[in-house]
Image (tube, rainbow, N blue to C red):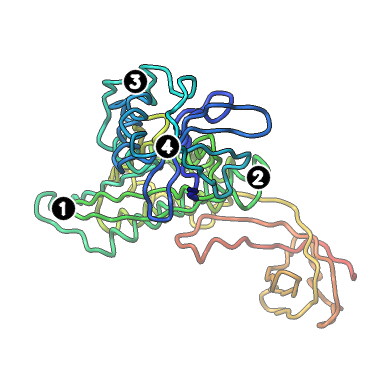
């Protein structure tokens, strides 16, 4: 008899997968212990187990030999695969399990007696990274009920900040689009505050490693929330990461100010089994937003760039111009110090190359994150 199962996670990994978790199309779990590893394929002894066994294995409540001995009387299987991404075919066995196939005694996925924080246990149970947000209003801490849109607003803005951090890390590492973050939001509310679980999808993660991209992004966001309280800190975020990242952080702080709330962000990974986190106090958020409003046009980033396209508009009274490029319309101003004659003689409909200075400044909303272009020289194309 044959069964088809799908790989879900690696429970023990040394030089190769030693213990894996799979499931059938009904969602029933199967645990596989390697019996004959080689360079071309893996062979596993597999038993179907109760749905709570994977969690017990991860929490150190049962060892591998006991699990196999308890469940193999109901049937055991062998499988061979060289690609865990593909469906795995299990072949049911009629004979007793060979002695040399059995796991060694007292081999645990996790050391017995390990104490887990509740958030860590949540991550272990789900076998995925879990982030918890605690949002508390300072208006009336015991009676005030935040509006649902406040919960959604704050959580979605933090989500965007995490994803932006992931984009920066992806660009630094030269990774492809498959490494981008995919976050699901689960929201259990309670009076006066809310805890929001944001679970990172297991799909497209590396088979044998934690989602390093997400963990690195969360570490970056932790540092931002804990230490970025001054205008100079925002300048540093813009220079080190991106202007988009700095402005998304501003957006999150503005959401906290609107709802008069503190934010505590905690997260745990099922593999490292340690809770980490950060927080933002309302008074720090208010002070930084006030400083941002006092510097609305401050230059965060300035760079030389070249824009090529069809000349479509020019307003002599304001010095504003537009070029239709392959990526859309680019609008800017003439740098009168460099081009005192402005744009006399340019013809609408013809193509030009504009040498510009691109500047980005603090803005209060996502719609205001576009850079400003200042024309200094131009040539026909």
In space, the residues marked 3 and 1 are separated at their CA atoms by 38 Å
In space, the residues marked 4 and 3 are separated at their CA atoms by 26 Å
Instruction: Give the quarter of the image for residue 191.
Output: bottom left
> Can you say whether 79 is above or below 285 in the image?
above
In space, the residues marked 1 and 2 are separated at their CA atoms by 41 Å
Q: Residues within 10 Å of mark 2 (few under 14, many from 20)?
A: few
Residue shown at 51% from the left, 37% from the top: 78
Mark 2 lies on a secondary structure that is loop
Q: Which residue is mark 2?
A: 175
Which disc, if any, is residue 263? none
Q: Are marks 1 and 4 in contact (CB under 8 Å)?
A: no
Q: Of circles 3 and 2, which is in front?
A: 3
Mark 1 lies on a secondary structure that is loop
Mark 4 lies on a secondary structure that is strand
- Say which of 12 and 294 sits in front: 12
Give the mark, 3 or 2, whose residue is nearer the N terminus: 3
In space, the residues marked 3 and 2 are separated at their CA atoms by 35 Å
Q: Which residue is mark 4?
A: 76
Which disc, if any, is residue 111? 3
Q: Are marks 4 and 3 in contact (CB under 8 Å)?
A: no
Measuring from the top left, give residue 349's x and y in whole percent.
82, 82
């Amino acid at each position: 008899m044959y069964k088809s199962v799908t790989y879900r996670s690696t429970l023990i990994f040394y030089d190769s997968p030693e213990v894996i978790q799979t499931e059938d199309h009904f969602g029933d779990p199967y645990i596989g212990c390697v019996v004959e590893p080689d360079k071309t394929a893996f062979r596993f002894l597999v038993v179907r187990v109760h749905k709570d066994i994977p969690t017990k294995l991860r929490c150190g409540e049962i060892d591998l030999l006991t699990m196999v001995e308890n469940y193999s009387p109901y049937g055991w299987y062998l499988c061979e695969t060289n690609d865990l991404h593909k469906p795995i075919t299990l072949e049911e066995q009629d004979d007793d399990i060979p002695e040399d196939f059995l796991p060694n005694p007292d081999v645990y996925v996790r050391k017995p007696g390990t104490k887990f924080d509740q958030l860590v246990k949540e991550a272990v149970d789900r076998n995925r990274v879990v982030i918890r947000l605690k949002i508390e209003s300072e208006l009336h801490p015991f009676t005030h009920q935040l509006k649902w849109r406040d919960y959604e607003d704050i959580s979605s803005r933090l989500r965007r900040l995490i994803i932006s951090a992931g984009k920066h890390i992806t660009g630094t590492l030269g990774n492809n689009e498959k490494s981008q973050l995919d976050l699901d939001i689960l929201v259990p509310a309670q009076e006066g505050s809310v805890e929001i679980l944001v679970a990172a999808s297991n799909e497209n993660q590396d088979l044998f490693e934690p989602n390093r991209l997400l963990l690195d992004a969360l570490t970056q966001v932790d540092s931002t929330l804990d230490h970025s309280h001054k205008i100079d800190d925002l300048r540093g975020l813009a220079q080190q990461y991106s202007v988009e990242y700095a402005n998304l952080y501003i957006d999150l702080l503005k959401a906290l100010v609107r709802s008069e709330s503190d934010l505590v962000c905690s997260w745990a990974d099922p593999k490292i089994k340690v809770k980490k986190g950060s927080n933002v106090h309302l008074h720090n958020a208010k002070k930084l937003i006030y400083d941002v409003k006092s510097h609305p046009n401050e230059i965060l980033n300035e760079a030389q760039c070249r824009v090529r396209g069809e000349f479509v508009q020019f307003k002599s009274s304001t010095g504003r111009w537009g070029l239709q490029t392959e990526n859309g319309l680019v609008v800017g101003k003439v740098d009168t110090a460099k081009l005192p004659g402005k744009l006399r003689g340019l013809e609408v409909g013809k193509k030009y190359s504009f040498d510009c200075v691109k500047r980005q400044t603090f803005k209060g909303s996502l719609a205001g994150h576009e850079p400003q272009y200042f024309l200094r020289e131009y040539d026909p194309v």
